[in-house]
Amino acid sequence: MSTYARFARLPLEIESYALERLEQPVTRGFTRVTTVVRLSGRGEEGVGEDVSWYAEMHDREQAAGPVLPLQGSWTLDSFSDALEIPEPHRRWAYESAALDLGLRQDGTALAEVVGLEPRPVSFVVSPGLGDPPSARVVRRWLELDPGLRFKLDPGIDWSDDLIRELADTRAVVTADLKAYYGAADEKPPDVDLYRRVAEGLPDAYLEDPALTDGTDPVLAPYRERITWDAPIHSVTDVEALAFPPRTLNSKPSRFGTLRALLDFYDYCEERGIGLYGGGMFELGPGRGQIQYLASLFHPDAPNDVAPRAYNEPEPREGLPRSPLEPAPSPTGFRWAEGAASI
């Protein structure tokens, strides 16, 4: 039986729903906006979080209000079939809220249905390095917690000295080259940067490189370290990669539907593809939900799912250390209140 089949027939009663806007300054110098979806029925509430990237998308959703025809009796499968939301991040908010509500109405928990025991979750921190970039923030975090590990975004302004300084910390586990976030007319990737990062950070995953006639030969010796994130929305996307991956980044909201996410987990398990989790600067229940999924499917990986306080503009003392102890709620798809934050 597929993992999704265990959930497909779960009954779901929705009487009403509400939207809640969240807003907070975060690291990298911007203000994050998300929307919490709250589905209600039979005295229970299910929550999910829309992590669409642009604030204007949340503004439009708030202005429209709860206008979707969600009321009624469903199964998780029929609810998903009826949702007419093409944007995956927004759709995931409703699907995860429906999963949470259905499980709570049934008196069961996500882990119970999946058949896996939540385990402590290893996590990394992904701060910006400033302008101009420096290792200061990494060293400050390491002063507070020498055991921290990092996911960083190399840029063309990374000098050889900076790469050496970061390598000396032995704490950088993922270098995100972010080749899939720019405009179609963006300049070609910097072949020299790819070479310097691959050579200078020999233990780090190389995430989302652009494979071109220039970069492919440079990265060929390091294929076992190449991972993918932004292009992965389904099993079909994995099969379309230039070569079979050894490891992938799993961001649940990219998949949009519970079926697509669980089919992806099954596919990777069957083929021995390693996974690590990624976040989207969640401000609400979405952070705990991705920590919950990491605790079940890839707890020991370098998951970019640190408690929300690690996304604040400045490092501070007193935050939970990796690994996070499991904190699933007794029922539903929710991490215990507060465990995802500080």
Image (cartoon, grey):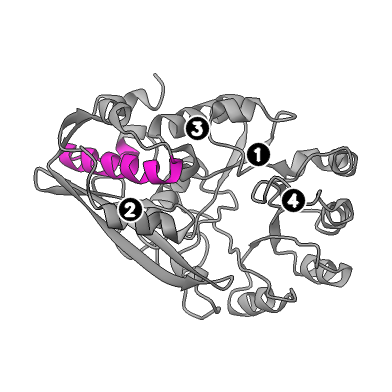
Q: Earlier in the sequence, mark 3 or mark 1?
A: 1
Q: CA distance from mark 4 to mark 2?
A: 30 Å
Which residue bears the numbered disc 1? 247
Q: CA distance from mark 2 to mark 3?
A: 30 Å
Which residue bears the numbered disc 2? 61
Which amino acid lies under the numbered mark 4 shown in the image of this protein?
Answer: Glu
Q: Position of residue 37 (x, y in %)?
A: 28, 51
In-image side of 80 versus 165 (left or right): left
- Any part of residue 235 in sight: yes
Q: Earlier in the sequence, mark 2 or mark 3?
A: 2
Q: Secondary structure at mark 4?
A: loop
Which residue bears the numbered disc 3? 265
Which residue bears the numbered disc 4? 186
Q: Earlier in the sequence, mark 2 or mark 1?
A: 2
- What residue span does the magenta drawing correspond to? 87-112
Which amino acid lies under the numbered mark 3 shown in the image of this protein?
Answer: Tyr
In-image side of 233 versus 221 (left or right): left
Dot 3 crowding, Cα within 10 Å, few <14, some 14–19, many 20+: many
Dot 4 crowding, Cα within 10 Å, few <14, some 14–19, many 20+: few
Q: Which quadrant of the figure has residue 134?
A: bottom right
Q: Main secondary structure of the magenta part?
A: helix
